[in-house]
Image (cartoon, helix red, strand yellow):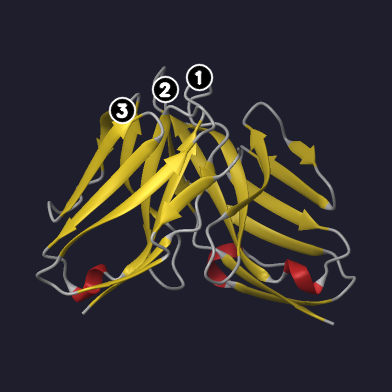
Amino acid sequence: DTEVTQTPKHLVMGMTNKKSLKCEQHMGHRAMYWYKQKAKKPPELMFVYSYEKLSINESVPSRFSPECPNSSLLNLHLHALQPEDSALYLCASSQAHGAGYGYTFGSGTRLTVV
Amino acid sequence: GESVGLHLPTLSVQEGDNSIINCAYSNSASDYFIWYKQESGKGPQFIIDIRSNMDKRQGQRVTVLLNKTVKHLSLQIAATQPGDSAVYFCAENENAGGTSYGKLTFGQGTILTVHP
């Protein structure tokens, strides 16, 4: 399996809702990432997990809460989002021993906050 | 056809032409570079990569050139096809010194349109 699977593909949520995005990979990658991508812009790094521990938080607002329950799963919990948080959220993974080599991206979750 | 990165984010070519997409990167500590293709509604798709100890790498119809002196990366696509139409991003990876992860930063992207 050489894929990163993200669910759901589309999500519409209100500003008072709580929702979660899920990401799964079975390539044995021990580094996993969340990126945010606005329309016509490049992906921007949000979080990095390495060996299930949070290694980088790029000053992301606390309404985004990442979680890595095990080496194959990465979640992004969403609460009290704003309309400007609407974007494509991408998950990626990479080979840990290569320090970032072998990046693979999922197809993303298209999030709309209303 | 050729793009010049930040100042020309779109590139239009005819089918069969060769395309050159340019990218300037900023971090001297970056040790690994990747070109991605992104089609509408999809995630970035790996095209080709190059490590900082190389200056050229070839794949199927694609070539990446790296000039570390001027911090410049280019992607050459031979015999461009309509299916190559997409947004192309360069990305630079900074290995945070012995860690088990990288920090991948994307360039602004170039829209490639291939006309039949």
Q: Residues at badges 3 and 1 in contact (C-beta under 8 Å)?
A: no
Q: Amino acid at mark 1?
A: His
Do pointers 3 and 2 mark residues of a single chain? no
Mark-to-mark CA distance, 3 and 2: 11 Å
In which quadrant is the C terminus of chain A drawn?
Answer: bottom left
Chain holding disc 2: B
Residue at 21% across / 75% down in the picture?
A83
**Above or below, comparing residue A25 to residue A90 in the picture:** above
In percent of width and height, residue A20 lies at: 25, 55
Q: Would residue B66 be found to the left or right of residue A98 on screen?
A: right
Q: Secondary structure at mark 1?
A: loop
The three-letter code of the residue at mark 2 reads: Ser
Residues at discs 3 and 1 both on one chain: yes
Neighbours of disc 3 within 10 Å: few (<14), some (14-19), many (20+): some
Q: Would you place residue A31 above or below residue A39 in this image? A: above
Mark 3 lies on residue: A52
Labels 3 & 2 near each other (Cβ < 8 A): no
Q: Nearer the viewer, residue A92 or A75?
A: A75
For label 2, the crowd category at 10 Å Cα-Cα, with few meaning under 14, some 14 to 19 and many 20 or more, is many
